[in-house]
Structure formats: C-alpha cells, structure tokens
Image: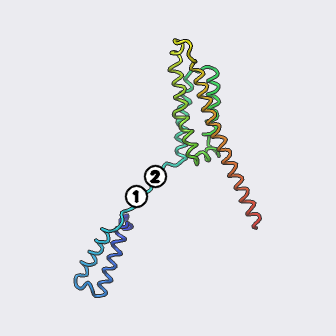
Amino acid sequence: MKYLESRKNLTGSACGLVGLALTFAGVAGPYWPVVVAGLYGAGALIAPPERPALPDFPDPSAQLDELRGDFGRLREYLGGVELPPAAAGRLTELTELLTALLDPGWVAEVLAQDPEGMHALSRAVRQDIPEAVDTFVRTRWWTRLTPGTEPPERHLERQLTLLYEEADRLAVALREVEARRQESHTRYLEDRGRSQ
C-alpha cells in the first residue's frame, strides 16, 4: 500500500499513461506493452526520492512525567543526606518550589510548552542539585583537615541560593505567560462581544 502512494509509482504511472496515449495515437504500434512498461520503469527511475519522515519527538507531557519521576528519586536521595541547618533550609525552599513547578495543573501545562524552562528545570533536578549536594558530602570532611579554607557549607548554601533564584525566575516567567494568555483571552471575548 505504501508503494502505491510513493513518488516512484506515481511518476511511473504518469509516464505509463503517456505510453497509453502514444498507443492510442498509433505511435507505439504492436509493441505498445513494451512502450508502456518501459515508460513506467523510466518514470519510476527518474522519480525524486521519498521525503524522510518527520522525527517522532516525545510528547512534552511525557518529558514532564519523566522529570517528575527523576525529581522523586532526587528527593529520596536528599532525604538520606545530612546537611547543616542553613543549607537544609535552603534546600527545603528549593524543593518546595520545584514541587510546585512540577505539580500537575496550569503551571505544568505552561511549562510543558516552554522548552527552555523544561531544560533549566531538568538540569536543576538531574544535574545541579545532586552535584552540589554530592560535592558537599564528599568534601566536608576534607576541609576539616585543612584549616583556613572556606567551609563547604557556605559553598553549598550559595549554590542552593543560586538554584532557588533560577527556579524562582522560571516561576515568575511562567506566571507572566499565563497572565498574558488570560489577557489575550479577555481581549478576544471583549472583541467578540463588540462584534455581536
């Protein structure tokens, strides 16, 4: 069935019809089947190649579901790590904000349509937060052996603060997108009401 709709078959059939027209015009003579078949074959050979199929990209909501699963695994990991009180508080604020961004609802719908926001959130969940916490866990006992260095707790607090600010900017941007969408819908309804 796929070949019947292919460019090779369509071009070959068009050339075969030209062969039939030549036959009815009396040009092909007794060799008309060879002429029709030859023109069909020539048309199939000169037909442009088939266009490649469009890539099948995953559904943005499926990507969001995967990210939610990864965030759940990250929270399990973070639950088993001991952090100093200030860093733990910062991490709690960050995870609460990420939970709000990933919860199903209008925020997730807007986020699913924002590839840059999805990338930033994915990078935070899958790379930045685990890396920051793991680096702290690995280096905290080394720094106690080397006096005069800045404690890793401060680095972790700064990193978590920066990640929180980035996630907060994303949340603000998503709120603005939703506000613009609501304003646009309001204008549409007002215009529709005026036209009636």
Measuring from the top left, give residue 38's x and y in whole percent.
26, 74
Give the residue number, with chain letter if any, for mark 2: 56
Label 2 secondary element: loop
Q: The N terminus is located in which quarter?
A: bottom left
- 154 or 56, nearer to the observer: 154
Disc 2 marks which amino acid? Answer: Asp
Tell me what residue is drawn at x 58 percent, y 23 percent. 155
Q: Nearer the viewer, residue 74 or 12?
A: 12
- As drawn, is 194 to the left or to the right of 125? right
Q: Quadrant of the C terminus?
A: bottom right
For the point 75% across and 67% down, which residue is it?
Answer: 195
Q: Check disc 1 and report the residue beneath it.
A: 52
Farthest residue in the bottom direction? Answer: 26
**Colouring style:** rainbow
Classed neighbour count for the residue bearing mark 2: other residues with Cα under 10 Å, few (<14), some (14–19), many (≥20): few
Say if 93 sits above or below 115 in the image: above
Q: Secondary structure at mark 1?
A: loop
Which residue extends farthest front?
Answer: 148
* Residue sitting farthest toward the left: 30
Measured as percent of width and height from the top left, residue 108 is found at 61, 44
Q: Amino acid at mark 1?
A: Pro
When asked about the image quadrant of residue 173, the answer is top right
Apparent side of residue 105 relative to residue 115 in the rendered image (left or right)? right
**Would residue 182 be found to the left or right of residue 147 on screen?**
right
Q: CA distance from mark 2 to mark 1?
A: 12 Å
